[in-house]
Amino acid sequence: MIAPPPLPARPAHVVYVTATDYGLSLPDTLNAGATTFRVVNRGRELHHVLFVRLAGGHSAADLARAMKGDAPPPRWAELDGGPNGVSPGDTSLATTVALRAGHYAALCMIPGPDGVPHVAKGMITDLVVRPAAYPVAAAMPANDATITMFDYGYRSSTPITRATREVVVRNDGAQPHEIELARLLPGKTMADLAAWAQKMDSPPPAEFIGGVSPLAPGKSNDLALSLKPGHYAMLCFLPDAKDHAPHIAHGMVHEFTVQ
Ligand SMILES: [Cu+2]
């Protein structure tokens, strides 16, 4: 009997997902286990990848239909994160998702200037995850900080600095949450970013560098950081379950400076 080779501490390969206006290109089949993704944005609008695990034999097309209008994801769809929004022309930070065998949809929920989420323009595709030969949890990378998301805010186990590399991001809230990481352009403030986010119809006062796409309560992703000096904000744009206002309006913003 041949033993499987030992697993590297960090997954050796990265799956690059190409985003265009309006499509996502990625493999249609992957193996279960900790899988690291980066989004390459070849479009003119902001894009991310959100992995949604589908139960009950549902497909990506079923999910697209169920999410028409402003409807929240249905009960059979579990938000599993992924690499969050990255500015046009850039490649996102690497985000690791513990894929489990089954059927997923990969999609972009970010709206354009017209307010229509990209998923409604066809930016959604099916992903089949095959069973792996080893336990999924064993392959998640080691980490040096944990960021906890809650209703409504972020808590970091240790300050985020230039030296911070692997971060576990976990949702301890009762609602889904995300981390969108923005680096403010020189001279711009959080107020400028908040004002821009209301309409998104002008060039943003920040660079979006990725993060963790929406995660269901209790779920986690790993985020690989390598931050250059600057003024950053992590934000959650998800609509609130009660008043539908984006979570940034409930104070879900964390500003920090990297020296
Ligand atoms: Cu949130």
Image (cartoon, helix red, strand yellow):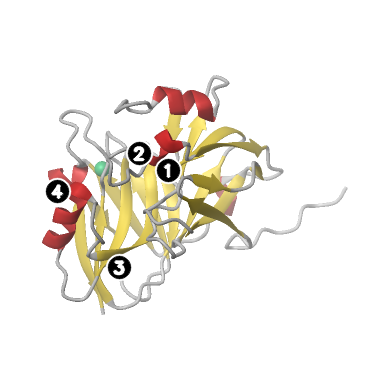
Disc nearer the start of the sequence (4/1):
1
Residue that carries the numbered disc 1 in the rendered image: 108
Label 3's element? loop
Q: Ligand 1: which quarter?
A: top left
Q: Which quarter shows the C terminus?
A: bottom left
Q: Count residues near mark 4 (Cα–Cα under 10 Å), then give few for <14, some for 14-19, many for 20+.
A: some
Disc nearer the start of the sequence (3/1):
1
The residue closer to the viewer here, 147 or 223, is 223
Image height of 211 relative to 257, above or below: above
Do the CB atoms of the residues marked 3 and 4 lie less than 8 Å apart?
no
Residue that carries the numbered disc 4 in the rendered image: 251
Do the CB atoms of the residues marked 4 and 2 lie less than 8 Å apart?
no
Q: Position of residue 167 (x, y in %)?
A: 40, 60
Disc nearer the start of the sequence (1/2):
1
How far separated are the C-alphas under marks 3 and 1? 27 Å
Q: Count residues near mark 1 (Cα–Cα under 10 Å), then give few for <14, some for 14-19, many for 20+.
A: many
Label 1's element? loop
Q: Residue furthest top?
A: 56
Q: Position of residue 212 (x, y in %)?
A: 39, 51
Do the CB atoms of the residues marked 1 and 2 lie less than 8 Å apart?
yes
Instruction: Decide if residue 109 is in sight here.
Output: yes
Disc nearer the start of the sequence (4/2):
2
How far separated are the C-alphas under marks 4 and 1? 24 Å
Which residue is depicted at the point 19% across and 32% down?
244
How far separated are the C-alphas under marks 3 and 4? 19 Å
Pair 4/1: label in front? 1
Q: Amino acid at mark 3?
A: Ile
Q: Position of residue 233 (x, y in %)?
A: 24, 61
Mark 4 near ligand 1 (CB under 8 Å)? no
Q: Amino acid at mark 1?
A: Cys
Which residue is depicted at the point 32% across and 43% down?
111
Residue that carries the numbered disc 3 in the rendered image: 160
